[in-house]
Image (cartoon, helix red, strand yellow):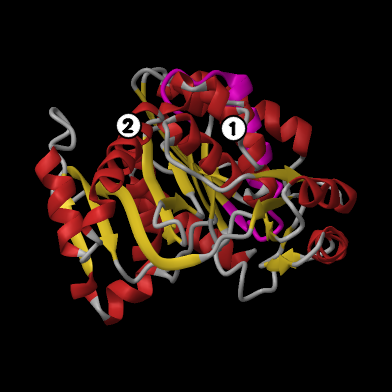
Amino acid sequence: MKLHEYQSKQMFSKYGIPIPKGRVASTALDARHIAEELGGRVVIKSQVLVGGRGKAGGIKVAKSAEEAEALATQILSMEIKGLPVRKVLVDEAAAIEQEIYLGITNDRAAKKPVIMCSAAGGVDIEEVARTNPEKIIKVHINPLIGIKDYQTRDVAAGIDLPRENWKQFGEILRALWQVYVDTDATLAEINPLIINKERKLVALDGKMLIDDNALFRHPELSEMRDTDEDAPSEVEARKYGLTFIKLDGNIGCMVNGAGLAMASMDILKFFGGEPANFLDIGGGAGADKVAAAMRIILSDPSVKAILFNIFGGITRCDEVAKGILAAMADVKPKVPMVVRLVGTNAEEGRAMLANANMITAETLADAAQKAVAAAKGA
């Protein structure tokens, strides 16, 4: 789950990381009032969950409250990469002496969190990594002991940070680590972290990604979710506790178990098909959950066939069959459906589907080939 810039910076501020004065506004008049409070010269920043806001015209500097209102009116009417701008962040304008990139993320290869820092801040860090990787300092963190003082000094020295800023830099880095840990983040990033004209460090921008699998521990973060960038089907799936990701293919997939779902998608690709989604109904899914999953799959007009691949361990195959029949009665699908049921009560489930015009299969390879042929026939 992504947090907006203003949400990320509010989180940073709670942990003592200095941020500019400012507030979020949903109307141009609100932006004007905030600008008046801040003395007139402000930055108006669109709040959308995509990169490239500045290049798209979504970040502007205003020299007065009147100009802030005019710019906010303009930005609030924009769409950036297909997402509507519903809010703007009005921050006091900063005098920038130096820009730094600072972030903490997961290094899956090393199986540890990693600090990434660069003196080339304020730009796309992926571009820096591609063209000048030597400019990025990387230091791994032992999650059992956290960040040590020598590591903050190593990073500061590695980017040639002025010695006068080392102490504050260490405080900010340790605070960023604590935010990262406490929120179950997969990314906590400040870009840029600036040195202002008073020679102090300030987090001018912020970005956080939260692990969806940990949101049950953070109901307050779940409430911050912006669903504008999510496909409607993914939003609907979340209501039923389904793991769903929309893809670009034409064969809908309903599978129980993430590993089995990945294997099903791989074998569809192997036989020349293109999966339309990743959908894991999980263990113990009842008929109502299966019916909801089927409705979500069929809401995609590009779906030409559906593959059901159910291994009945915890999930009973007869319950899955009930869900399929319930969804068929409700949605009245017009696409062919291939079902592979194996495991607990599989025979009962197959018997229930025998008269429902379903294509059945006993092996995954057979089911995948039938699904690909059915999609091409459709």
Q: Is residue 288 magenta?
A: yes
Image quadrant where residue 239 sits: top right
Q: Nearer the viewer, residue 93 or 173?
A: 93
Lateral position of residue 328 relative to residue 173, left or right: right
**Residue 122 versus residue 347 in the image, above or below:** below
Q: Position of residue 186 (x, y in %)?
A: 36, 42
Residue 178 has which mark?
2
**Farthest residue, direction left:** 150
Query: Who's the residue at 65% across and 63% down the image?
Result: 378
Q: Nearer the viewer, residue 199 or 319?
A: 199
Depth check, mark 1 against mark 2: the one in front is 2
Q: Earlier in the sequence, mark 1 or mark 2?
A: 2
Answer few, some or many: residues within 10 Å of disc 1's Cα (few below 14, many 20 plus, some between 14 and 19). few
Query: Who's the residue at 15% across and 52% down the image?
Result: 139
User: How far separated are the C-alphas under marks 1 and 2?
Assistant: 28 Å
Residue interval drawn in magenta: 280-305
Lateral position of residue 104 relative to residue 25, left or right: left
Q: Is residue 20 visible?
A: yes
Query: Who's the residue at 50% across and 24% down the image?
Result: 349
Q: Position of residue 363 (x, y in %)?
A: 33, 44
The kind of secondary structure element at disc 2 is: helix
**Residue 315 versus residue 159 in the image, above or below:** above
Query: Who's the residue at 16% across and 63% down the image?
Result: 158
The kind of secondary structure element at disc 1 is: helix
Q: Is residue 352 visible?
A: no
Lateral position of residue 314 relative to residue 19, left or right: left
**Farthest residue, direction front:** 198
Q: Position of residue 281 (x, y in %)?
A: 49, 31
Query: Which residue position is annotated with label 1?
Result: 238
**Farthest residue, direction bottom:** 131
Q: Is residue 378 magenta?
A: no
